Image: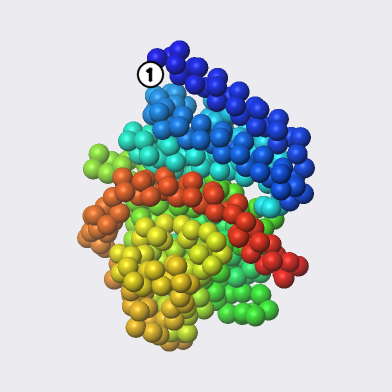
């Protein structure tokens, strides 16, 4: 592609985007628009988004190389979309446009994150750009690097959503959003990725354990809870971003648990990885159940249950559509994801999701035994090979490419906006 043609296509895209932005600026916020206004906005957005998709189809590799100085810089998702907005006007929303979006409830947004989804789908699909972006997201976060000396020295870091403590070579990650049953939001994603990084980077840690803490919520006061899934109240208020939450959790700490953290370490591996154990008290709903699919050993109290209600909420349950079938088989996976089936820990199909089910009063003892079994060099080498075989990076990137766009479309679907709006109204 010559520079002249590339520059010309960018200019056409920028001009088309400017016309659409001018149209939207003249209209009231989406909920107040007339049927004719909604139709005019939808037609204009569809046309410019088709141009964006076509541009990424043709130019993803060269654009990504430009944004990353020939793939010598490793930009995380948020850095990448901001850089793209500056370099290629009209392709993705500007910082100012995204700031305006963040100030609005979900139902009043223009859906500019859909344009981020188009861009990131193109990048993740590209044979060179996609793997490079995966590597960028597997690197330690600046926050974790800043906290590493403190954690290495004291063995303790307390964050808003996660308490991290090292004891006898085990990193204990405790989800501690006691007021909301560990429901997921951007704060929890940031804290969990930080905790996962610290666990993987600290040479004194040999294995990681994730468990929910005791709750202050009236219905579960004094009981441990694993995770209640996505915070629907935050989604309704506009506080669940595509890049900072929905994509960051998949490409960040979840993928790091599978693959390890990207380092410049020894010649025999670019990654530092460790075995992981999860223990489920009460329930693992939505994102909580998704977490279990990346752990090496999962224990559950016999009175716990698991569910993935994303389809009922109208969204996609992360990478569960990619991972769950290999655990449960296609029929059970469809019952859980498409039909909203809840699986109790004491029923036969739970054996596909967890390794051990024990009475609640015996869970502590079972956790200690599981940690001891997985604490070995051979375990580490074999989990690495199993994860490579079961979840090849190329297949993961291909799934996440489509997820980036489809989830962006879903969080602005009329059904989703209606459901989360009703949920938020009940919680008010």
Q: Is 127 drawn above or below residue 191 in the view shown?
A: above
Q: Residue at x 64, y 64 (%)?
A: 419
Q: Residue at x 65, y 80 (%)?
A: 219
Q: Quadrant of residue 11?
A: top right
The way the protein has been coloured in the rendering is rainbow
Q: Is residue 174 visible?
A: no
Percent position of residue 121, x then y: 44, 41
Q: Is residue 41 visible?
A: yes
Q: Is 123 drawn above or below residue 296 in the view shown?
A: above
Disc 1 element: loop
Q: Horizontally, is 199 left or right of 413 in the view?
A: left
Q: Quadrant of residue 66?
A: top left
Camera-side residue: 290 or 88?
A: 88
Q: Residue at x 47, y 84 (%)?
A: 303
Name the image quarter holding the C terminus: bottom right
Percent position of residue 74, x then y: 44, 34
Percent position of residue 80, x then y: 51, 34
Percent position of residue 168, x then y: 40, 65
**Residue identified by numbered label 1:** 1
Q: Quadrant of residue 12?
A: top right
Number of residues whose C-alpha sits closer than 10 Å to that of mark 1, classed few (under 14), some (14–19) or many (20 or more): few
Name the image quarter holding the N terminus: top left
> In this view, which residue lies farthest toward the top?
4
Q: Horizontally, is 205 left or right of 106 in the view?
A: left
> In this view, which residue lies farthest toward the front?
36
Q: Residue at x 41, y 33 (%)?
A: 57
- The total of numbered circles placed on residues is 1
Q: Is 65 drawn above or below residue 33 in the view shown?
A: above
């Amino acid at each position: 592609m010559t520079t002249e043609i590339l520059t010309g296509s960018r200019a056409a895209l920028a001009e088309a985007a400017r016309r659409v932005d001018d149209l939207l600026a003249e209209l009231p916020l989406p909920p107040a628009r007339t049927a004719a206004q909604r139709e005019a906005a939808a037609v204009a957005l569809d046309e410019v988004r088709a141009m964006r998709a076509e541009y990424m189809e043709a130019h993803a590799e060269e654009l990504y190389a430009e944004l990353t100085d020939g793939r010598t810089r490793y930009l995380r998702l948020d850095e990448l979309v901001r850089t793209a907005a500056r370099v290629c006007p009209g392709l993705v929303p500007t910082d100012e446009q995204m700031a305006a979006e963040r100030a609005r409830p979900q139902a009043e947004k223009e859906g500019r994150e859909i344009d981020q989804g188009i861009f990131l789908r193109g990048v993740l699909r590209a044979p060179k750009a996609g793997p490079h972006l995966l590597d960028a997201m597997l690197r330690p976060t600046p926050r974790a690097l800043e906290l590493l000396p403190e954690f290495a020295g004291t063995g303790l870091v307390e964050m808003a959503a996660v308490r991290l403590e090292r004891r006898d070579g085990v990193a204990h990650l405790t989800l501690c959003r006691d007021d909301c049953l560990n429901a997921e939001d951007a704060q929890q994603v940031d804290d969990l990725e930080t905790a996962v990084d610290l666990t993987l980077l600290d040479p004194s840690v040999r294995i990681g354990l994730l468990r929910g803490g005791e709750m202050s919520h009236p219905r579960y006061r004094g009981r441990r809870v694993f995770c209640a899934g996505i915070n629907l109240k935050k989604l309704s208020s506009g506080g669940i971003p595509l890049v900072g939450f929905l994509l960051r959790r998949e490409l960040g700490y979840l993928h790091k648990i599978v693959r390890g953290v990207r380092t410049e370490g020894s010649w025999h591996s670019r990654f530092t990885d460790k075995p992981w154990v999860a223990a489920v008290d009460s329930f693992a709903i939505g994102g909580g159940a998704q977490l279990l699919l990346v752990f090496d050993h999962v224990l559950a109290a016999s009175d716990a249950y698991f569910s993935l209600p994303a389809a009922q909420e109208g969204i996609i349950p992360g990478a569960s559509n990619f991972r769950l079938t290999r655990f449960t088989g296609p029929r059970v996976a469809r019952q859980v994801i498409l039909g909203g089936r809840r699986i109790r820990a004491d029923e036969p199909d739970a054996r596909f999701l967890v390794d051990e089910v024990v009475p609640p009063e015996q869970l502590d003892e079972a956790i200690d035994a599981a940690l001891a079994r997985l604490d070995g060099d051979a375990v580490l080498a074999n989990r690495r090979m199993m994860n490579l075989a079961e979840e090849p990076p190329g297949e993961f990137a291909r799934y996440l490419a489509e997820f980036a766009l489809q989830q962006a479309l879903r969080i602005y679907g009329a059904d989703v906006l209606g459901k989360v709006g009703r949920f938020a109204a009940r919680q008010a």
